[in-house]
Amino acid sequence: MFRETFYEISQDRYQKLEADSKALANLLTQLQELVTGRGEQLEQVKVPRKITIPCERCDYATDGKCSFDYPEAFTSEAHDCSMFTE
């Protein structure tokens, strides 16, 4: 089911919204040009990020399993686990 709600706003707010929208579109265009123009240089200096998996040192990990049964345990997605304790 799709529902639309309409609100009336003042002409001043509408003009401000329109100006902000144009400014944001302009900023996004400039950022895209910057990224596109420097793409090759950024590729050359890109360093692979090593992700550490803290599960082996976690108090909640026993016998290669997570006590909380998190499916991300012992994978690269476990690097920011909120339950990690040493």
Image (cartoon, rainbow, N blue to C red):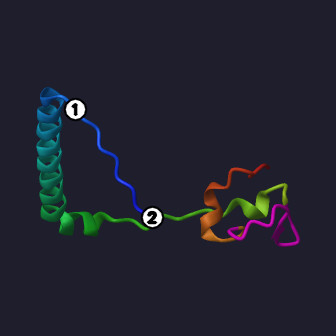
**What residue lies at 47% left-to-right and 64% top-to-bottom?**
49
Q: Is residue 24 above or below residue 69?
A: above
Q: Which residue is mark 1?
A: 9
Q: Magenta residues?
A: 61-72
SS under mark 2: loop
Dot 2 and dot 1 residues touching (CB under 8 Å) = no
Three-letter amino acid code at disc 1?
Ile
- Left or right, 78 with respect to 56, comes to left
Q: Residue 12 location in percent, x, y? A: 13, 27
Relative to 39, 80 lies left or right: right
Percent x, y for residue 1? 45, 64
Mark 1 closeness class: few <14, some 14–19, many ≥20 residues within 10 Å: few
Q: Is residue 43 left or right of residue 34?
A: right
Question: For the view shown, which residue lies furthest in the right direction?
Answer: 63
Q: Does residue 46 lie above or below 17 as drawn?
A: below
Disc 1 secondary structure class: loop
Give the spatial CA distance, label 2 vs label 1. Answer: 26 Å
At 72% from the left and 67% from the top, the residue drawn is 73
Front in this rendered view, residue 57 or 25: 25
The residue tagged 2 is: 1
Is residue 81 a member of the stretch shown in magenta? no
